[in-house]
Image: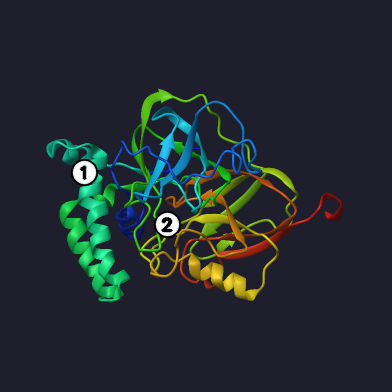
Amino acid sequence: MNNTKIVTTFIVVTSICLIAFIVSSCNESQSTISDTISQQEFSPEASELVVKGGGNLVEVTTGHDHDANLHTFDLNIDKVPEGWTRFQLTNATHADHFFLLYEVPEAAIDAASNANQSVLDHWYDTVTYPFQTEWNPYFEGSIGWGTFVNNLFGAVLSSAPWFPDAVIMGGPGITAAGTTSQTTVYLEEGLYIAECYVKDENGEFHSFNGMLAMLEVTGETSKEREPRATMKVSISSQQGIEHPESVRPGKHTVAINYEDQAIYGHLVGHNVQLVRFDDGYDSALLSELEAWMDWSDPDAFIDNSPEGTTFLGGAMEMTEGSTAYYTVNLKPGTYAWIAEVPDASEKNMLKTFSVPFGRNMK
């Protein structure tokens, strides 16, 4: 199945444009990681979510330099052939992260060349820095949301008129500290940028502080086959998240289908995340989790999800008709599928479920 790259409605175009505002810092040489989890505390082999495999596999490891407050992505390769591509995100820091992919439009590449800059440098100068600059007074409470949005459009669209052509392509979802997640998406030839826009306590996006990566997809054909799903989950603005009621424990490859895409009050579209409850849940914890998922709230989407919850990955935003394949090992316990949107439960985008012990399966 070839994931569509064409935005089919004006709303989706606008959503893509706004999502791209939260893109990342361009320092490609920042490789110091001084705040990572120790090898005794974490290793990919020890993670219950690690997925082994060969073929078209991009291994991404997160890092954090505490002194410089730099967040980083480290990729094992920066070039892959066209086709189905598996991204394995190993979170070796103490904050939650994700790996959202954008296809870089040709106009952005041309603009970077004309400015004698790398694509990453140009993206940072024309998008990331203006976004953070306009966000700061809203975060500090000196302006309202409407003023922030107006200022943001004025600043960013004047410096980067190519934004409507930037396309969201999915990628590994929110992955908690010390865990590994894997998501497979279809990528066509071109350049791609990946970012994480979780915030620090000071209101700075991880992307602004270095969590950016570039990937080139060549015109060669990948030998990677489309994954075979053992479970299907779909999401739409009308029906919310739809998922199977009965889920067996063990390894699953989940086909996550984007039946449509829409723009919400926080300026971006919907995605699908999986969260595990460490010791069950109550209405208070669900409300706290739901509130945390709104990046536009200055007090939310900061570093780590609420205590008692662990994010296990998923699929970041994609265009209508796209499919991502998310691979996870489900142990007995309580979980929820949730979208990163305001008031997810009202949109039918917060769905709890349980994975029983084998003998308790109906």
Q: Amino acid at mark 2?
A: Val
Judged from the image, the secondary structure of the residue bearing numbered disc 2 is loop
Residue 261 seen anywhere in this rendered image of the structure = yes
Q: Quick check: 329 above or below 299?
A: above
Residue 99, position in %: x, y?
Answer: 44, 46
Give how far across and how far down residue 82 sits, in percent. Answer: 42, 29
Q: Are marks 2 and 1 in contact (CB under 8 Å)?
A: no
Residue under label 2, please give it. 198
The number of numbered discs placed on residues in the rendered structure image is 2
In which quadrant of the rendered image does the C terminus lie? bottom right
Q: Residue at x 48, y 61 (%)?
A: 340
**Viewed as shown, does residue 362 lie left or right of 154?**
right
Residue at the outermost right position: 359
Is 135 situated left or right of 293 in this image? Answer: left
Name the residue at 63% across, 42% down. 47
How far is disc 2 from disc 1 in space, using C-alphas?
22 Å
Q: How is the image coloured?
A: rainbow
Q: Given the image, on which type of amino acid does mark 1 rest?
A: His
**Residue 331 badge:** none
Q: Nearer the viewer, residue 50 or 192?
A: 50
Q: Residue at x 47, y 51 (%)?
A: 97
Q: Residues within 10 Å of mark 1 (few under 14, many from 20)?
A: many
Question: Please, is residue 284 above or below residue 311 in the view?
Answer: below
Residue 235 in the image: x percent, y percent?
Answer: 53, 57
For residue 27, what is the image quadrant?
top left
Residue 244 percent across, percent down from the top left: 68, 56
Residue 122: mark: 1
Is residue 245 visible to us here?
Answer: no
